[in-house]
Image (tube, rainbow, N blue to C red):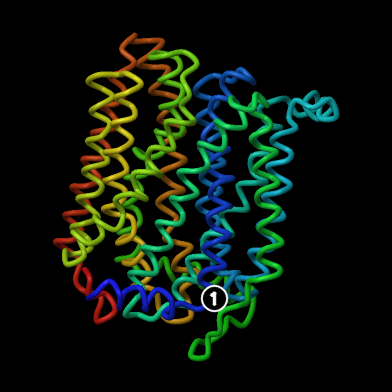
Amino acid sequence: MSSRWRWREIRSGFAPAFWVANGTEIFERIAYYATSAVLAIFLNEELHFSSQVTGWLMGISGFVVFSLPILAGALADRFGFRRSLLFAFVLLTVGYFLLGSVTAPWMEPLRKVLGDKWLLLTILLIPALGPGMVKPCVAGTVAQTSGEEIRSLGYSIYYMLVNVGGALGPLAAWLVRKRLGLGIESVFRAAAACVFLMFWATLLFYREPRRPEERKVASVREAVENIFVVLGNLRFVSFLLISSGFYVSFWQIWISAPLFIRRYVEPGADTDRLLSIEGVTIILFQVLVAYLTRRKAAIRVIALGFLISALSFAILAVHPRVWTFAVMMVVMALGEITQASRYYEYCSLLAPPGREGVYMGYAFLPIAIGYLIAGLLGGYLLREFGSVLHRPAAMWWVIVAVGILTAALMWLYGQMARPAGSRATTE
């Protein structure tokens, strides 16, 4: 297909809501990744939590972020994407502001009553609710505003724009924290301002996609019941559980890797700026990788992406340096590119008409499970291999093993799973 024809598809093939939703997603991702880039450092170095408590706090908040889409997707089918997005941006604004105010004098009474650990957990859960509602709304908007013949392109655009935010977020954190000299807490306050602007953008410009051929969910009860309907799809659930292993490895770059680099490689290293390498790599190579894998079976492409990402951690295990961490981020990103857009496409193809919201909400379940395990595992590995065994770099071989096992299980799933019908022709 010519580039001219493809450009015509991009201009005319998507409803305006597609572009508004993806535009707000960019800035929500900037805020999310800016805060994620410094959160482990903030908890460990500023608030003096141990690596295990830091991993525990991040794991629980991350689990909420990516498990909430299961319920939020079902409720979005009932109440509509627009109202759900508005509510999400209010939660994010409040949550990030509170996170940036933890050490403020007016928070001192709460710190004394609850203690730092429980206060931080409570505060972290507030902004964690926001992304969990945004994601199924945006992903569902993509599904409803793009025809089946260009849906793969729609998810590629969605994924690329998400990674624009993923690339700019850590850079924004570094700019606020170091270049402007405002400190880590100002990163959280800047994130609050960013998502507050997206509240107004959604209010003024987003219009609910029309669904003339789809049955609207009749009640909240039915929306919740739809959650359990998905659990009856054993093929879909098996796919999600296997995919969780990828995110056990992936989330280490945000949880344990910054602490590892600053503790055992180079104290004070700008890990927030380095984390932007992954997003930049995805932006640069997304189209090329999608083109090279477009005719390959989806499950095999996903398994290949899992394997590439797993092997990237071997670089840090063999030669732990700041520059090798940067190289590792490039390889990790190439693996993520390989699997991600096909992953969401595969999930959407298995979703019955009218239930895109709840199915795309479930698509984030592996990310949630992976985040929870990654937080617990990352904190444990840092302590065990660093403080106990005094071989900190060896911890990455455990992560490599998890990723390789996940890739093998996904390949086996592809061998055993039968085609779902005409809607899953890319399997």
- Residue 32 visible in the displayed image: yes
**x, y percentage for residue 186?**
68, 32
Q: Does residue 36 appear left or right of residue 251 in this picture? A: right
Front residue (pair 106, 280)? 280
**x, y percentage for residue 240?**
35, 57
Front residue (pair 378, 311)? 311
Residue 114 position (above or below residue 419): above
Residue 420 position (above or below residue 257): below
> Residue 39 lies in what quarter of the image?
top right
- Residue 122 visible in the displayed image: no
Q: Secondary structure at mark 1?
A: helix
| Pointer 1 residue | 16
Front residue (pair 330, 100)? 330
> What is the residue that sits farthest to the front in this orientation?
4
Q: Does residue 188 appear left or right of residue 297 in this picture? A: right
Q: Does residue 412 appear left or right of residue 72 in this picture? A: left
> Residue 400 lies in what quarter of the image?
top left
> What is the residue that sits farthest to the bottom in this orientation?
213
Q: Does residue 310 appear left or right of residue 415 in this picture? A: right
Query: Which amino acid is tagged 1?
Result: Pro
**x, y percentage for residue 230?**
43, 69
Residue at image point 26% right, 74% down: 424
